[in-house]
Amino acid sequence: HDSDSGLRWRLPSLNTRLGSLRKGDFGFVFARPESGKTTFLCSEVSAMAEQAKQQGLGPVIHFNNEEQHDKVKLRYYQAVLGVTLAQLFSNRGKSDAMYKEKVGGHILLPNLTNFSNKQVEKILAKFNPSLIVFDQIDKIQGFDADRDDLRLGTIYQWARELAKQYGPVIGVT
Protein backbone atom coordinates (compact mmCIF):
# COMPACT_ATOMS: atom_id res chain seq x y z
CA HIS A 1 0.00 0.00 0.00
CA ASP A 2 1.20 3.49 -0.63
CA SER A 3 1.21 5.75 2.39
CA ASP A 4 -1.77 7.81 1.20
CA SER A 5 -4.21 4.98 0.51
CA GLY A 6 -6.89 4.21 3.06
CA LEU A 7 -8.58 6.46 5.58
CA ARG A 8 -6.20 8.92 7.23
CA TRP A 9 -6.36 10.09 10.82
CA ARG A 10 -6.97 13.76 11.63
CA LEU A 11 -4.03 13.71 14.07
CA PRO A 12 -0.67 13.57 12.24
CA SER A 13 0.88 11.55 15.08
CA LEU A 14 -1.62 8.72 14.48
CA ASN A 15 -0.84 8.71 10.75
CA THR A 16 2.86 8.48 11.61
CA ARG A 17 2.49 5.74 14.23
CA LEU A 18 -0.47 3.73 12.90
CA GLY A 19 -0.78 4.66 9.24
CA SER A 20 -3.99 4.76 7.26
CA LEU A 21 -6.91 2.44 8.00
CA ARG A 22 -7.69 -0.09 5.27
CA LYS A 23 -10.04 -2.99 4.72
CA GLY A 24 -9.06 -5.81 7.08
CA ASP A 25 -7.71 -3.53 9.82
CA PHE A 26 -9.12 -4.07 13.30
CA GLY A 27 -7.98 -2.04 16.28
CA PHE A 28 -9.00 -0.90 19.72
CA VAL A 29 -9.26 2.31 21.67
CA PHE A 30 -8.74 1.52 25.35
CA ALA A 31 -9.20 4.06 28.11
CA ARG A 32 -10.76 4.53 31.52
CA PRO A 33 -14.43 5.51 31.78
CA GLU A 34 -15.27 9.20 31.27
CA SER A 35 -11.86 9.97 29.76
CA GLY A 36 -12.94 11.28 26.33
CA LYS A 37 -13.01 8.16 24.15
CA THR A 38 -16.22 9.12 22.35
CA THR A 39 -15.07 12.71 21.80
CA PHE A 40 -11.75 11.41 20.42
CA LEU A 41 -13.61 9.04 18.11
CA CYS A 42 -15.96 11.73 16.83
CA SER A 43 -12.99 13.92 15.97
CA GLU A 44 -11.01 11.25 14.15
CA VAL A 45 -13.95 9.45 12.54
CA SER A 46 -15.52 12.66 11.24
CA ALA A 47 -12.30 13.38 9.33
CA MET A 48 -12.42 9.88 7.87
CA ALA A 49 -16.08 10.31 6.90
CA GLU A 50 -15.15 13.43 4.92
CA GLN A 51 -12.49 11.42 3.10
CA ALA A 52 -14.91 8.57 2.41
CA LYS A 53 -17.43 11.00 0.94
CA GLN A 54 -14.78 12.64 -1.26
CA GLN A 55 -13.54 9.23 -2.45
CA GLY A 56 -17.05 7.93 -3.19
CA LEU A 57 -16.79 5.23 -0.50
CA GLY A 58 -19.57 3.96 1.76
CA PRO A 59 -20.48 5.71 5.01
CA VAL A 60 -18.91 5.40 8.42
CA ILE A 61 -21.22 3.52 10.78
CA HIS A 62 -20.80 4.24 14.48
CA PHE A 63 -22.63 1.76 16.70
CA ASN A 64 -23.02 3.44 20.06
CA ASN A 65 -24.25 1.58 23.12
CA GLU A 66 -22.56 3.75 25.68
CA GLU A 67 -23.88 7.31 25.61
CA GLN A 68 -27.14 8.97 24.65
CA HIS A 69 -27.64 8.93 20.89
CA ASP A 70 -28.33 12.67 20.58
CA LYS A 71 -25.28 13.53 22.67
CA VAL A 72 -22.99 11.59 20.32
CA LYS A 73 -24.67 13.16 17.29
CA LEU A 74 -23.94 16.63 18.69
CA ARG A 75 -20.29 15.66 19.19
CA TYR A 76 -20.11 14.71 15.52
CA TYR A 77 -21.57 18.08 14.52
CA GLN A 78 -18.98 19.83 16.68
CA ALA A 79 -16.12 17.73 15.28
CA VAL A 80 -17.15 18.19 11.63
CA LEU A 81 -17.71 21.93 11.97
CA GLY A 82 -14.99 22.68 14.54
CA VAL A 83 -17.36 24.65 16.76
CA THR A 84 -18.49 24.86 20.38
CA LEU A 85 -22.05 23.93 21.37
CA ALA A 86 -22.91 27.62 21.69
CA GLN A 87 -21.65 28.29 18.16
CA LEU A 88 -23.48 25.24 16.84
CA PHE A 89 -26.81 26.37 18.29
CA SER A 90 -26.37 30.06 17.42
CA ASN A 91 -27.41 29.32 13.83
CA ARG A 92 -28.72 25.76 13.66
CA GLY A 93 -29.91 26.09 10.05
CA LYS A 94 -26.46 27.15 8.85
CA SER A 95 -24.82 24.41 10.96
CA ASP A 96 -27.11 21.75 9.46
CA ALA A 97 -26.34 22.95 5.92
CA MET A 98 -22.58 22.98 6.50
CA TYR A 99 -22.68 19.54 8.13
CA LYS A 100 -24.63 18.07 5.21
CA GLU A 101 -22.21 19.61 2.73
CA LYS A 102 -19.17 18.15 4.48
CA VAL A 103 -20.36 14.67 5.51
CA GLY A 104 -24.04 14.38 4.58
CA GLY A 105 -25.00 10.71 4.61
CA HIS A 106 -21.49 9.57 5.50
CA ILE A 107 -21.79 9.35 9.29
CA LEU A 108 -24.49 6.92 10.28
CA LEU A 109 -25.31 6.55 13.96
CA PRO A 110 -28.00 3.88 14.29
CA ASN A 111 -30.30 4.68 17.20
CA LEU A 112 -30.06 1.28 18.88
CA THR A 113 -29.53 0.29 22.48
CA ASN A 114 -28.23 -3.09 23.58
CA PHE A 115 -27.85 -4.21 19.98
CA SER A 116 -26.99 -7.70 18.79
CA ASN A 117 -24.56 -9.05 16.25
CA LYS A 118 -27.47 -9.92 13.93
CA GLN A 119 -28.78 -6.31 13.97
CA VAL A 120 -25.27 -5.08 13.17
CA GLU A 121 -24.88 -7.52 10.28
CA LYS A 122 -28.17 -6.40 8.69
CA ILE A 123 -27.16 -2.73 8.85
CA LEU A 124 -23.69 -3.41 7.43
CA ALA A 125 -25.12 -5.42 4.53
CA LYS A 126 -27.50 -2.57 3.71
CA PHE A 127 -24.94 0.27 3.77
CA ASN A 128 -21.57 -1.35 2.86
CA PRO A 129 -19.55 0.96 5.15
CA SER A 130 -16.05 2.28 4.67
CA LEU A 131 -15.43 2.22 8.45
CA ILE A 132 -17.18 0.56 11.40
CA VAL A 133 -16.98 1.82 15.00
CA PHE A 134 -18.24 -0.11 18.03
CA ASP A 135 -18.47 2.04 21.16
CA GLN A 136 -18.53 -0.25 23.42
CA ILE A 137 -17.61 -3.45 21.60
CA ASP A 138 -17.71 -5.65 24.74
CA LYS A 139 -21.43 -4.95 25.21
CA ILE A 140 -22.59 -6.36 21.85
CA GLN A 141 -25.17 -9.06 22.46
CA GLY A 142 -25.64 -12.37 20.68
CA PHE A 143 -22.46 -14.09 21.82
CA ASP A 144 -22.64 -16.79 24.49
CA ALA A 145 -19.83 -18.67 26.21
CA ASP A 146 -19.16 -20.30 29.56
CA ARG A 147 -16.51 -17.72 30.43
CA ASP A 148 -16.31 -14.00 29.74
CA ASP A 149 -12.86 -14.29 28.11
CA LEU A 150 -14.26 -16.79 25.58
CA ARG A 151 -17.27 -14.56 24.86
CA LEU A 152 -15.02 -11.54 24.29
CA GLY A 153 -12.71 -13.59 22.07
CA THR A 154 -15.71 -14.56 19.94
CA ILE A 155 -16.81 -10.91 19.65
CA TYR A 156 -13.32 -9.84 18.60
CA GLN A 157 -13.01 -12.61 16.00
CA TRP A 158 -16.44 -11.63 14.61
CA ALA A 159 -15.30 -7.99 14.37
CA ARG A 160 -12.08 -9.08 12.59
CA GLU A 161 -14.20 -10.90 9.99
CA LEU A 162 -16.36 -7.78 9.52
CA ALA A 163 -13.17 -5.77 8.90
CA LYS A 164 -12.14 -8.21 6.19
CA GLN A 165 -15.58 -8.13 4.58
CA TYR A 166 -16.48 -4.43 4.78
CA GLY A 167 -13.71 -2.14 5.96
CA PRO A 168 -11.67 -1.22 9.02
CA VAL A 169 -13.21 -1.73 12.46
CA ILE A 170 -12.45 0.28 15.59
CA GLY A 171 -13.59 -1.25 18.86
CA VAL A 172 -13.81 0.85 22.00
CA THR A 173 -13.62 -0.54 25.50
Image (tube, helix red, strand yellow):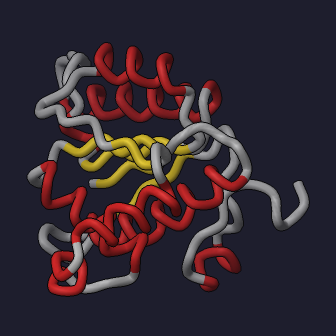
Q: Quadrant of the C terminus?
A: bottom left
Residue 149 located left or right of residue 125: left
Instruction: Residue at the far right: name it.
Output: 2
98 or 54, nearer to the observer? 98
| Vertical order, 114 against 50 (above or below) | above
Name the residue at 67% across, 75% down. Answer: 15
How many discs mark residues in the rendered view? Answer: 0
Residue 24 located left or right of residue 134: right
156 or 123, nearer to the observer? 123
Q: Quadrant of the N terminus?
A: bottom right
Name the residue at 28% across, 49% down. Answer: 135
- Where residue 78 appears, as percent x and y from the top left, is 31, 74
145 or 120, nearer to the observer? 120
160 or 144, nearer to the observer? 160
Q: Give the quarter of the image for residue 172.
A: bottom left
- Where residue 86 appears, as percent x and y from the top left, is 15, 85
Residue 46 located left or right of residue 173: right
Name the residue at 14% across, 67% down. Answer: 33
Name the residue at 59% across, 41% down. Answer: 130
Q: Give the quarter of the image for residue 82.
A: bottom left
- Where residue 22 appears, as percent x and y from the top left, is 69, 48
Residue 44 located left or right of residue 86: right
- Where residue 170 appears, as percent x and y from the top left, is 45, 50
